[in-house]
Amino acid sequence: MKKWLSPALLIVTFALSAIAHYTHWNAVAQFLICAISVVFVAGFLGRATESVAHYAGQRLGGFLNATFGNAAELIIAIFLVKEGLYDMVKASLTGSIIGNLLLVLGASLFAGGLKYKVQNFNISLAGLSGSLMIVAVIALFVPAVFLNTHVITDSESDTLSLIVAGTLIVAYIAWLIFSMITHKDYLADVTEQKDQELPHEHAPIWSRNKSIAYLVLATVMVAFVSEWLVGTLEVFTVQFGLSELFVGAFLVAIIGNAAEHSAAILLAMKNKIGASVEIAVGSSLQIALFVAPVLIFVSYFMGNTMNIVFTTIELVAIAVAVFIAKSITQDGSTNWYEGLMLLVVYVLLGVSFFLV
Amino acid sequence: MKKWLSPALLIVTFALSAIAHYTHWNAVAQFLICAISVVFVAGFLGRATESVAHYAGQRLGGFLNATFGNAAELIIAIFLVKEGLYDMVKASLTGSIIGNLLLVLGASLFAGGLKYKVQNFNISLAGLSGSLMIVAVIALFVPAVFLNTHVITDSESDTLSLIVAGTLIVAYIAWLIFSMITHKDYLADVTEQKDQELPHEHAPIWSRNKSIAYLVLATVMVAFVSEWLVGTLEVFTVQFGLSELFVGAFLVAIIGNAAEHSAAILLAMKNKIGASVEIAVGSSLQIALFVAPVLIFVSYFMGNTMNIVFTTIELVAIAVAVFIAKSITQDGSTNWYEGLMLLVVYVLLGVSFFLV
Amino acid sequence: MKKWLSPALLIVTFALSAIAHYTHWNAVAQFLICAISVVFVAGFLGRATESVAHYAGQRLGGFLNATFGNAAELIIAIFLVKEGLYDMVKASLTGSIIGNLLLVLGASLFAGGLKYKVQNFNISLAGLSGSLMIVAVIALFVPAVFLNTHVITDSESDTLSLIVAGTLIVAYIAWLIFSMITHKDYLADVTEQKDQELPHEHAPIWSRNKSIAYLVLATVMVAFVSEWLVGTLEVFTVQFGLSELFVGAFLVAIIGNAAEHSAAILLAMKNKIGASVEIAVGSSLQIALFVAPVLIFVSYFMGNTMNIVFTTIELVAIAVAVFIAKSITQDGSTNWYEGLMLLVVYVLLGVSFFLV
């Protein structure tokens, strides 16, 4: 009985959410049905990611999960860029980076750490990801300092933004070549090797192709449901008088990262912490090194270049998140307290954003 | 003869210091007798800590030493809060953090390193302590940035300070649970394991209960003598025209941390560097994550909430101390040059504070 | 035939460059002949360094290379100090530090990494160098913050600069004692040990004394040619309207570090990455901890003390370079992508300096 219950509930709640959204039910009803639906959809996505990870390895599985998750965010952001809402774009990029590094990673390490005393992942991957996060922070920080301490024309500022964006995209493509091709085995997960020797306890339920198809489908479903959920949230935020910055950087980011979130925690609790880290850290690297630069080029081709300069508090939030995440992941060994520290920093930032 | 000489000198010099203080001898005489007394008291404390560490393990011994040392500081600070001297409280908290991380830790690594080529301690403890120091810096830094870049009401600022303080206390209690209960063995000192296998060269002179009683007694004596010594210093500082910031953050902190100082150096020279690090780093973590937040709540209950926002140079001094201490401790291996680097940074900060 | 061709070309192109410079050929001709000459001279220096490293060990060889390279820079800078051109001195010190940490180190890791999948060097050396770089950043950063947030007399500012400079020189001398005497073997290169066991593939072509003489000679030649090349560059920069900051911090630094540059890359491609890192990191440490402080004392004895306070963007550039270099080197293991990350940061800084 259980076997068909979950798919049935998945489809029914998703369909109800769609109906609620497109037939404009009242906000509370929409919110409730979408919130229920997101749980099932996220669970579906988690299983699909795990199944893909079984065939493709934890790293590629994590990368695919992060990429499909960010694809949704990229699409939403392009619409915002079209309307010239650059501040909201930057707030949501900021929220996505800190949400992945602090909330998703923190919750994964915490949940995984409650079940397993110490969890390990590839230490070289930890070091390289940390360095790459520092590069991303530098790329956002240096232009901000130069533009704040020097008078510069709009055209020079655009040129700077475009060159920085181009350099980051090159760095990201090189990272994919490095991590997926030239040094794939060097970055392989420690637990993965053991997996291949032991007979598998859980053979995956789906075939390889089915797993990939389900991963795409689940990601699209998550994108839709979270989009609808965000829509209802906006009504609430007006009622409760929340600032746009807080909504953009926290509420939208939390729900918008539901895909990464659910998959990463589920994997951590199955002791596949390498895949969790790949999802959380990989997703935030993709936002900083690929999604943000692409949006700058998109804005350029639309005729009004978006500046790469973030506000001071956005920069501080990103820098702080990168610092603590790098400090915690760099030894390739995690435990529940490290997860808690990330969550503490997330709370500190959240309270500060909320009050401002 | 030696056996009773030291206790006798301890008691005589302590008694003379008390008489000098309460019968108001002149400042120079008070200073001299207290300075001599502090040497004996600190030596007593060092032996008591070592003896407790023998029974309780280096980590718990270090923790008890740091806690009793900070208890004295907390009491003094509460009196300052009562009188509303918030700037002096923050200066002395700053001085205590940088004094522990740079002077106490630096002198310990240097002294230990002159005797032993390389000293090792638990690398996981090193990594976690480093991350937790970063969390503490973030907790002080984020509110400062937000309050400096945004207009905010006093009541919002109070709320922010209280929530940050509460979060830090939760993080500190969780740290104690993690390090003393769930992952105690994971953080055990490397040399401790060897100790337990070898027959002990020096059996401790005191029984377990006597050791603990002596540790409490010694800490209380150190607190009193250092308090009296600080009292005489204030007279000197007026004579020599020193700034309050320099006195609070350096002179008071150096003498106020005499307990940690003497015990940490003595343990380092006996190759128990794990206990030294626990005292120095553990003490500064306790100041940042527990003493400072508790003072904010105390001020709140007294009706005038102390803000969590430190001055720019205090923040810079703390951040700089945390950075270099983290960088030096993170490999779990120490030598004399690493101690020297910490002392160099302490000198650089001291000169800057002195001149300003 | 090949055997005498290279020395002949070395001498001929060097002689031609000298003639071009002293008989004032036109700028383009001077530039071309000097640029060709620098290739041969740098190659000569690379071989001499490698030969010295064979006799003296990779670390001492790297140190000698860095020292002779910086001697030239020190001499040029003293002339600038004499003329009171302090801004240009600081720009070229900044350029030299970031050039070594990002361009020289980046190109070495990249070139070495294309040939060898992973290259390793002593992890303790990596950790200590990283910490020492942080100390250097702190020494530049703390006075800048204090002088920016407080009113201070010129005489106090001079005192602060001299004390900081003196402290750094002490720290540098202690570092030489530590790394060359007390802990020489502790910091020995990992590959060096293997070298000593295996029969050498390439016996060095020169005797020990000849190698040292050639190293000195080659360094002097590089200093002259790069000086002449810089002279022609200034003409170009006027034509192309480049800012002095960009020229000082990038063009002059790139050519002025030709010695370190060529030797470091050649060694990396022979899998002697330890010597490469020693050259690049050791050279920038020497600039920050020895050359810069010596210049402050020189300016003091010339009667007009040079301030230790660098501009905001210089400080940011140095801090950023130190951070990413430390992050990348700290695991003692390198690959092509780590080199690329350093080059990316160099490009980001270069573009920013160029546009400002």
Image (cartoon, coloured by chain):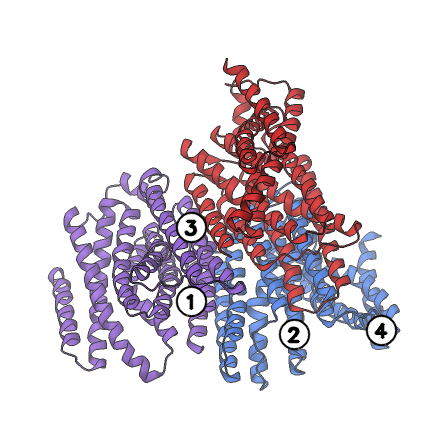
Chain colours: A blue, B red, C purple
Instruction: State the CA–CA distance, disc 4 to disc 1.
Output: 53 Å
Query: Label 3 belongs to which residue?
Result: C132
Q: If the image is split into quadrants, where does the N terminus of chain C sit?
A: bottom left
Q: Residue furthest bottom?
A: A303
* Residue C190 visible from this viewpoint: yes
**Which amino acid, by three-letter code, is at mark 4?**
Ile
Query: Label 4 belongs to which residue?
Result: A19
The mark nearer the N terminus, 1 or 3, is 3
Do tags 4 and 1 sit on the same chain? Answer: no
- Contact between marks 1 and 3 (CB within 8 A): the answer is no
Location of residue B335 (image quadrant): top left
Instruction: State the CA–CA distance, disc 1 to disc 3.
Output: 21 Å
- Contact between marks 2 and 3 (CB within 8 A): the answer is no
**Which amino acid, by three-letter code, is at mark 2?**
Val
Instruction: State the CA–CA distance, disc 1 to disc 2.
Output: 28 Å
The mark nearer the N terminus, 2 or 4, is 4
Horizontal and vertical percent position of residue A188: 53, 51
